[in-house]
């Protein structure tokens, strides 16, 4: 049997049968049960291509991320795919390799194949994002743009918590180990730290920018060694692990000499030596929220206004933060840092 036979058996139109499988929430319980009963008796499995002829939809959603190897993105992707699978949608995944030109190409290409698109940490200009959203529903994650729906993980709020924690431990100066210069999240985190430092009477020094990789953290570790900061707040956990490794290799103790805080809490940083204090980002929840917003717009019979959702972060305190070193110890440590800078 085909969709025509199911419609005849259930006493409904073909479009109603299609809607029962693509947007069941739009049907009354009585109508939905009648369609499903007829489909079960006929052993009917909807054909996606045929359903698309009726609804105009492909059943595909797109997700664009900068770097699939970055541990920040898999929880987001899982949040999207779990929600999409439950809604009988397929997900097409593309990675931009942190290249704006490649991102533009992928966005243009995917918009011809999907019903809607989720773009994570976009490097595109606002105008390019608005053009994309004018063609198909688009939801941004960790990026905002006027007239485009977005889900933002408020790691900036977590950064403020991090500084409050350091200040309570007696620290009055810290280094911000900056991520990529073009990163929207990096700018947000840096601005939040600078603002909170002024509020708390702390001195902030920026190191970087760096690419968001472990090796960049190793390089930043040397910059920390040759400074006088008693604490470091690092753009993400990958880099923070590199910082910990470098400090340990140079004989700088964490947290006795320098406290270190990361961001994201997506790696097993609790197993690091010492266990890393970090700002936990709700990546999975952000992915789920973005998929829900996107699918609502894909299935809506009318254009819906853009929405903005904020997922809050929190500071997870572990062993890499401690009280500010005594002035005598810090002076001694600074003296140990005086020789010429070693090469990597």
Image: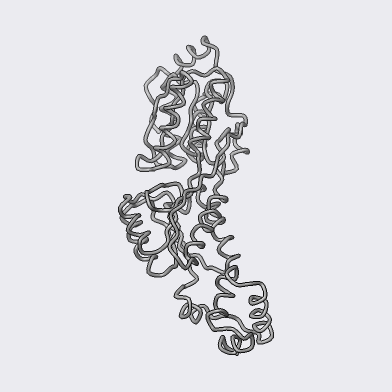
Q: Position of residue 174 (x, y in %)?
A: 46, 23
Q: Is residue 146 left or right of residue 18?
A: left
Q: How is the image coloured?
A: one colour
Write the residue at 45% across / 29% down: 193
Q: Is residue 58 above or below residue 100?
A: below
Residue 60 in the image, given as x and y percentages of width and height: 48, 68
Query: Which corner quadrant of the image does residue 94 belong to?
Result: bottom left
Counting the numbered discs, the total is 0
Q: Position of residue 293 (x, y in %)?
A: 51, 57
Above or below, comparing residue 65 to residue 282 in the picture: below
Against 271, is 31 above or below?
below
Name the residue located 50 percent from the left edge and 40 percent from the top edge: 154
Q: Is residue 191 left or right of residue 169?
A: left
Residue 260 in picture, x, y percent from top left = 53, 29
Q: Determine which quarter of the picture holds residue 220.
A: top left
Of residues 304 and 102, the one drawn nearer to the viewer in this rendering: 304
Residue found 50% across the figure and 48% down from its top: 309
Quadrant position of the N terminus in the picture: bottom right
Q: Which residue occupies 52% across, 68% down? A: 90
In the image as oriented, which residue stretches furthest toward the top? 328
Where, quadrant-wise, is the C terminus in this rendering?
Answer: top left
């Amino acid at each position: 049997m085909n969709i025509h036979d199911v419609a005849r058996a259930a006493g409904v139109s073909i479009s109603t049968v299609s809607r029962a499988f693509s947007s069941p929430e739009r049907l009354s319980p009585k109508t939905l049960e009648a369609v499903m009963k007829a489909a079960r008796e006929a052993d009917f499995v909807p054909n996606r291509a045929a359903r698309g002829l009726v609804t105009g939809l492909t059943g595909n959603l797109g997700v664009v991320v900068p770097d699939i190897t970055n541990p920040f993105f898999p929880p987001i992707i899982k949040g999207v795919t779990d929600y999409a699978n439950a809604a009988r949608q397929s997900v097409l995944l593309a990675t931009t390799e942190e290249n704006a030109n490649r991102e533009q190409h992928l966005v243009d290409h995917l918009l011809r194949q999907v019903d809607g698109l989720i773009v994570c940490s976009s490097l595109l200009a606002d105008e390019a994002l608005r053009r994309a959203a004018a063609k198909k529903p688009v939801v941004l994650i960790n990026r905002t743009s006027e007239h485009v729906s977005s889900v933002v993980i408020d790691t900036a709020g977590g950064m403020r918590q991090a500084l409050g924690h350091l200040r309570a431990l007696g620290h009055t100066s810290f280094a911000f180990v900056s991520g990529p210069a073009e990163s929207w999240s990096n700018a947000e985190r840096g601005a939040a730290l600078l603002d909170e430092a002024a509020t708390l009477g702390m001195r902030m020094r920026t190191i970087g920018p760096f690419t968001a990789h472990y090796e960049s953290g190793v390089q930043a570790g040397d910059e920390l060694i040759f400074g006088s900061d008693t604490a470091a707040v690092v753009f993400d956990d990958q880099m923070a692990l590199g910082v910990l490794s470098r400090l340990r290799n140079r004989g700088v103790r964490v947290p006795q000499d320098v406290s270190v805080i990361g961001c994201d809490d997506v790696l097993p940083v609790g197993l690091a030596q010492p266990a890393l204090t970090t700002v936990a980002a709700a990546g999975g929840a952000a992915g789920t929220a973005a998929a829900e917003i996107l699918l609502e717009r894909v299935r809506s019979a009318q254009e819906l206004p853009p929405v903005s959702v904020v997922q809050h972060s929190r500071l997870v305190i572990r062993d890499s933060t401690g009280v500010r070193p005594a002035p005598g110890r810090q002076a001694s440590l600074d003296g140990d840092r005086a020789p010429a800078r070693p090469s990597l």
